[in-house]
Amino acid sequence: MTEPVLEVRDLRVAFGPPGREVEVVHGVDLCIDAGEIVGMVGESGSGKSVTATAASALLPGAARMSTAAWRFEGTDLASADRRQLGDALGGKLAVVFQDPMSSLNPARRVGAQMSDVVRVHGGRSRREALADAVDRLRRVRIASPERRVHEHPHQFSGGMRQRAMIAMGLMATPSLLVADEPTTALDVTVQAEIMELIRELNETMGTAVLLVSHNIALIAEVCSRVLVMYAGRIVEELPASELTSAARHPYTRALMDAVPRFDTSRSEPLATIPGAPPDPAEPVAGCPFAPRCPWVEDRCRVVEPQLVRIGSGSVACHVAVDAHEAAEKEAVDR
Amino acid sequence: MTLVQEELGGEAGHAPAVPVRGRRGGDGRFAALRSLLSSPSGVASVTLIVAILLVAVLAPMLMGDAATKTDFGGELLSGSSAEHLLGTDGAGRDILARTLVGTRLSLVLALGATAVAAAIGLVLGSLLVTVGGRVQRAGMTVIDTWLGFPAILLAILVIAVLEPGGGAAAIAVGLSLAPFFARVTVTRTAGVAGLDYVLAARLLGLSRRRIAFRYVLASVADSLVVAVFSMLSECLIAVSALSFLGLGVQPQVGSQEVASIDWGRILNDSIADFRQRPEGTLGPALAIALCGLAFAWFGDSLGRALNPQVRPVGLRWRRRRVTSAAAMEEGA
Amino acid sequence: MMLAVEHLTARYPGTEVDVVSDVSFGVPVGGTLGLVGESGSGKSTLARAVVGLLELRGPSRVEVDGMDVTPGGPAERKHLRRRVQMVFQDPAASLHPRMRVGAAIAEAAGVAPGRSRADAAQQVPRLLDLVGLSKGLGERYPFELSGGQRQRVAIARALAAEPRILLLDEVTASLDVSVQATVLNLLKDLQTELGLTYLAISHDLAVMRYLCDEIAVMESGTIKERAAGDVLFESPRHPYTAALMDAVPRLDRTEERSFLLVGEPRDAAHRARGCSFHPRCPVGPEVREGRSRCVDEVPELLGDSHPVACHFPLA
């Protein structure tokens, strides 16, 4: 069996001055197999962006990160220094952020920026690298790539810049593409195109994808597996196909209920989730979702539920686990 | 927006809600003052300024005689001694006393120059932003050209037109430093004028005056305050330089004598024999440097106190507790 | 009609191209009209033109609560300020960062005619309560509140001026999903309670369907289709509407996409001849034979209950 592309165990990330640190990610496990498209969904404060950034070795210096295991294509990253990280990830892990204007250097031509990757890590010459850049731009369906490659980022539209970011990530053949809210700032039609592009790249090049978004429908459409994050923890993991039918965690269900759909009743109020996510600086007793949970029981406020494997996924909820066990028992009895 | 901000309570990738710091409620008007005094740095800078002001007010009264008492019979141009800590000048006058007395005039001139620069700069800047468009662009070009001239040379030019004197020096310096202020005003306010909350104010039908002051200027108040105080330091140096060159404060005799002492002039008196007796220049030089530091420090502290987002709150010795308003208040 | 717009044409000052051309619609008292479109469609410009923040050109006519406000003079502006208020997309930018939220609301309340400052201040607790915020929050600065709370303050402030029409510009775009639901519920409740008329702008079709009675789809500065919410989404007549709907990610998608758009909307200066949508139209001249009419002729908005501007509307 091939090893996973990315494997992180017990990831913890904290910010702040020593002694007054605030932990924003509390022991997350992440495992992405080759060619998989995995989605991480959560609202602000859930820790999803920090998790993705940490796993890509891109956390700012002010952050403190610890893992029980951290491997990329089998190479251990936890003990790697900067150079080793560069060797292990350069060209193989591509990242696309929400705002391409701040990830693209506005002062350099697009082709030049794109060439950096393969010239440094792939040893290509300037001419070869530029030809690669033109090819990648064409691959992401940017028209007239030979002309575009000599332009600056501000001459591209928003959607084009995002595609250029993806193209840049494809210069070497990445094993993993990490996309953090790649389409949030874009029109829905452009978003659909870019998602289509990502899916196509996954199919043709076998690139695994980690997609981070607050839009659960987007995740459901593109990803095969979904991780739901809340308060810096993964509260549920399940195949995307089972989201609407078999989501077990009350937060997952509440999240889906709160999104208006084309068949939502117009005469009823929308389902809301009372309360607000906990402040990461305040310690939490028991389940972080307890204050807002419709199924809450006494033990939920005292004992923090762990992620338990159920069916084809996992869930961190006492009530859900019990319900499942009861159903199993019933099935066995019959 | 940084990762930290997003994860500590941002919304779907947009503007963050910074967690609330432990705060005291109360009247908004004195909140700035209170916060200024609640941090060690704020207290120190205020103390320094108060000390300087006290010297400025009291020294001429208490040490006026010492500063003007000539002593041709005694030690002229003497170095540091027990009686004259910073020595005496060419007429036997005590330099330390003169330095302390000179505080008032130097400060007054620096303030005057700053007032001139700020008034011209603020008005010009606000006007340009309100008018906008091509006029604003043309105006900025003029300002940039104006800024390009070395301030001292420009001031000397103005003095050549007016007669040399303290007041003329203040005006001259004010005129040559005004474009800096105009530029700061334009840059800061232009950024604000297009924002949604200004638009919202216009929609409410609030008066132009209110929008200009309460909205546009108030938002940039803290950076303008910092600019004013750093300009104060610059003006002090420039005015002192002019006096040093003999183009500023002119020596008076009789009843006006005490009032006409400023640091630039004292420097002028002692510079001739700087090699043999450097301590003669020590007094005014240190005074100028110390004042410059005090202004900048105070301006910085005041600027921070005026911005509710960065102002220090609560007792300085207590650790800041971070609690989220959202967690406490968000309802269905 | 509380708000009636005819042949509205507008551009940003100093520019040479109309961003919005020949737009007409009406909103009945207590109703909600949604303007849906991509960036560059002109929907935000349209909103700003309606409240008099932009100069209107040509045969434009805007009537608000019975008065023609097109000339934009002081009397018209005064009338507008009392009738229409706006809630913006980004509450962090639409609230004065140095003003406590209670003071901001009081300031807006003070605008109502004949109201003293003391009266205005008294309105604050009532308004905070109206939007579901606790009274103590009046002392906070915007940066101390969450996005959802800020947006509710923005709504309270808009309501303080006692408008009859609220312009909602992407009001939930920067909010989390759960918070969005709260704000939408609030808006609907307020509408019933206060008899408000809404003009809502958004790119989020599902949200618009929930909030609005009628929806107008805008593209390149013109309205391409207009219909009641349910009707529009069940049987869209314009290919652009169908494409927009198709592009929205769905939790419950059963079929493959059939209307995939290619390319991006062009900016105002480079709009296409004839039907502005034809270069991207999934059933247009680029794709089908015999549709050269789309290149030569600008389609008119035709129809009574479900007008559409298309030479070859969908069945």
Image: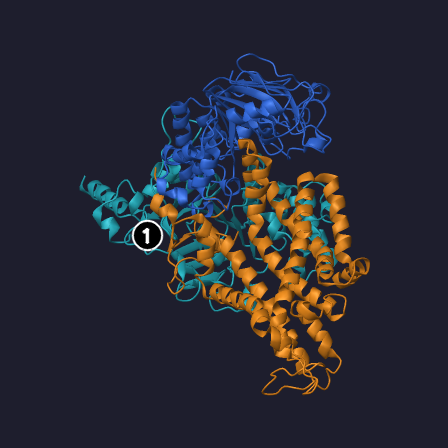
Chain colours: A cyan, B orange, C blue
Q: Is residue B303 above or below residue C147?
A: below
**Image-based side of A226 in relation to B246, left or right:** left
User: Visible in this render: residue A4?
Assistant: no
Q: Position of residue C103 (x, y in %)?
A: 45, 40
Residue type at mark 1? Leu
Residue B38: x and y in percent read 43, 61
Residue at 74% of width from left, 44% of height from top? B137
What is the x, y in percent for residue C154?
Answer: 47, 36
> Is residue B296 shown to the viewer in this render?
yes
Work out whether A265 lies above or below B124. Answer: above
Give the letter of the chain under mark 1.
A
Q: Position of residue A243 (x, y in %)?
A: 39, 39
Q: What residue is disc 1 on?
A: A307
Taking the view exactly as shown, the residue that stands out farthest to the top is: C304
Tell me which corner region of the image, top left, top right, bottom left or bottom right, holds residue B98. Answer: bottom right
**Local SS, label 1:** loop
Crowding around mark 1 (Cα neighbors within 10 Å: few <14, some 14 to 19, many 20+) is some
Q: Quadrant of residue B252?
A: bottom right
